[in-house]
Amino acid sequence: MRLDKYICQATTLTRSQAKKVIMQGRITSADTTVRNSAYKVAGNEAISLDGKLINVRTARYIMLNKPKDYICSTVDEQLPSIINLIKVDKPEQLCIAGRLDADTTGLALITDDGQWSHKITSPRKKCAKRYRVELAEPIQASAVELFKTGIQLKSENQLCLPAELELISENEVLLTISEGKYHQVKRMFAAIGNHVSELHREKIGQISLDTKLAPGEWRYLTEQEVDSIA
């Protein structure tokens, strides 16, 4: 792990503040001053800030292939929470970074790192999400331009942000959006006179659903996947 990231996870410092204390010579490894932010910290390495040992706070980053009839809530309601599918210690500390409807399947990201989750869910970040959509009616090629321009949703004052629509077949498309309005995907297709019959999220940012995961299965994200959310 990079030294500046290690400091951020072990303290309350931001990335820019971490780089500053590194440049100031306040970070040591085995009594040797380290001034390189990109320095790779080994797993058992002792890192100190101003002479005091700091340890990385353990944060968990999880990918789940969400099945139908589970809800993206941290507690059970009419249907069970997807948290029930993840067998880890202290599951009550986890939060879900971007929700899916009960009848929607696919990629769900779960973490106890609130700042990381915020980067996915904050409208300002415009984190892209890609969905595979099956439609009840054939879709016209002209819809590509409509989505690119911005769809007007019922009861909304402004157009949706431009979205990328890729036609796979008459009744199947890939849709990439960068916002998260309530039931947005279903409402976008309803706005052009169609109906979503199946909805599956494949990708969030640069993180794609692992094809080896069956519905209900999960794994921890790789360091590269975690770092891709900026």
Image (tube, rainbow, N blue to C red):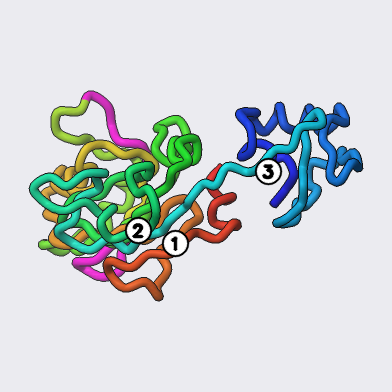
For label 3, the residue is: 6
For label 2, the residue is: 107
Mark 2 belongs to which amino acid?
Answer: Leu
Closest to the camera, between mark 3 and mark 2, is 3
Q: Nearer the viewer, residue 195 or 218?
A: 218
Disc 2 residue crowd, few under 14, some 14–19, many 20+, Cα 10 Å: many
Closest to the camera, between mark 3 and mark 1, is 3
- State the residue lying farthest toward the top: 157
Label 3 element class? helix
Q: Which stretch is magenta?
A: 157-174
Label 2 element class? strand
Mark 3 belongs to which amino acid?
Answer: Tyr
- State the residue lying farthest toward the right: 32
- State the residue lying farthest toward the front: 52
Name the spot of residue 106 as percent of width and height, x first.
30, 61
Label 1 element class? strand
Name the spot of residue 175 as percent of width and height, x first.
32, 55
Of marks 1 and 2, which one's residue comes earlier in the chain?
Answer: 2
Of marks 3 and 1, which one's residue comes earlier in the chain?
Answer: 3
**Left or right: where does residue 81 sit relative to residue 52?**
left
Q: Are marks 1 and 2 in contact (CB under 8 Å)?
A: yes
Residue at horizontal 66%, vertical 42%? Answer: 55
Q: Nearer the viewer, residue 150 or 108?
A: 108
For label 1, the residue is: 208
